[in-house]
Image (tube, rainbow, N blue to C red):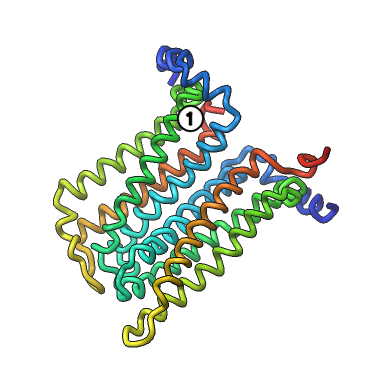
Amino acid sequence: MEILAAVSDSPFSTWIRESESLFGYPMFILLHTIGLAIVVGVSSVVALLMLSGAPRSVLAATRGMFPVMWTGFGINAVSGLVLMAADAPTLAMNPVMWVKFGFIVAVVMLMRSARRFAAADTDVAGAAPSGRARKALAAATLACWLGAIVTGRLTAYIGGPDFFVE
Amino acid sequence: MDGRMDAVVTWIQGTPVSEALRQSQYAFPAGETLHFVGLAMLFGFVAILDLRMLGVARQLPLASLHRILPWGVTGFTITFATGLLFIFATPEQYLNDWVFWSKMLFVALAGVNVLIFYAGGIYRLVETLGPGEDAPPPAKAIAATSLVLWIGVMFFGRMLPFLGVAF
């Protein structure tokens, strides 16, 4: 708890939390929204292409969208860390936040698998990832993103260090 | 907005729907969650289509992306419906706020941009865009405008608690 308090009491975190400047908390919450729209949005469309049975040539071409997805993820990771640091004792002790992190870790692994599938699809003469595996990957990706969004919103309503204390 | 929408605000506040939404402890959490889900669906489709027209992932044939159009339309429908929910729940927070109306202006302009894309014949220029092919300048202009407008929608949406008089 002392480390968390030290993080949120740092000059930068204090400024983020208490400043009235639009370049403080408002900017980082905006970046978090834009990052979400990019990474979740583009990743979901790629998942949909897999679920819809798009040809291997199309799935191979989705490789070009992965830098976009990772850019969105990077924006979210940085903005998320800043927002969390601004209220570290509350957010870090919120179990719902850790469930959200679980979904995010899972979806990062799924995105890496999707990237490997897309790379395999560039070799049209080679073995294709199985349709079942592809569809399972896509469905799991969509489910994890939904889970991350739901739990992310719920942190504003439930949780915190004293919420679960009787 | 200086209270010009006061009559509309008062009427909405008096409706049973508005009363029920204000009493519900689940309406706002559920509505906000769905608003973000819809936003991701809509912007995901818009971004991947626009970025392709701007030259990202050029091996993607545009027709295969355009087949995902129902996903984007569903996303817009979800954001629209949840947006109406917010307005009916707390009309006083939105209808007299210039930030909200700026957001609606950007949504309307994005809609005009879509109309120009389809009705203006731009889509016909790109619907058969194959792997490696470059979109013509009019399509690139539409795509760039689309991205700017939808990011503008997100900007004004996110700034509601910080600018204007909504919160």
Q: Crowdedness of circle 1 by 10 Å Cα count: few (<14), some, many (20+)?
A: many
- The amino acid at mark 1 is Phe
* Of A52 and B47, the residue lying toward us: A52
Task: Where is residue A41? Give x, y as percent.
Answer: 43, 55
User: In the orientation shown, which residue stands out farthest toward the bottom?
Assistant: A125
User: In the rendered image of this protein, does residue A47 appear above or below residue B78?
Assistant: below
> Residue B136 appears in which quarter of the rendering?
bottom left
The residue lying at 14 percent from left, 51 percent from top is B121
User: In the orientation shown, which residue stands out farthest toward the right?
Assistant: A2
User: In the rendered image of this protein, does residue B28 appear above or below residue B125?
Assistant: above
Q: Is residue A13 visible?
A: no
* Of B165 and A121, the residue lying toward us: A121
> Residue A58 appears in which quarter of the rendering?
bottom left
The residue lying at 51 percent from left, 24 percent from top is B90
Left or right: residue A153 versus residue A138 is right
Q: Mark 1 lies on which chain?
A: B
Q: Can residue B75 be seen in this view?
A: yes
Task: Where is residue B27? Give x, y as percent.
Answer: 54, 31
Left or right: residue A82 versus residue A145 is right
User: In the rendered image of this protein, does residue A126 appear above or below residue B105?
Assistant: below
* Of A93 and B162, the residue lying toward us: A93
Mark 1: which secondary structure?
helix
Count the labels in the image: 1
User: In the orientation shown, which residue stands out farthest toward the front?
Assistant: A132
The residue lying at 40 percent from left, 40 percent from top is B78
Task: Where is residue A105? Give x, y as percent.
Answer: 61, 64
Task: Where is residue B32? Give x, y as percent.
Answer: 52, 38
For disc 1, the marked residue is B86
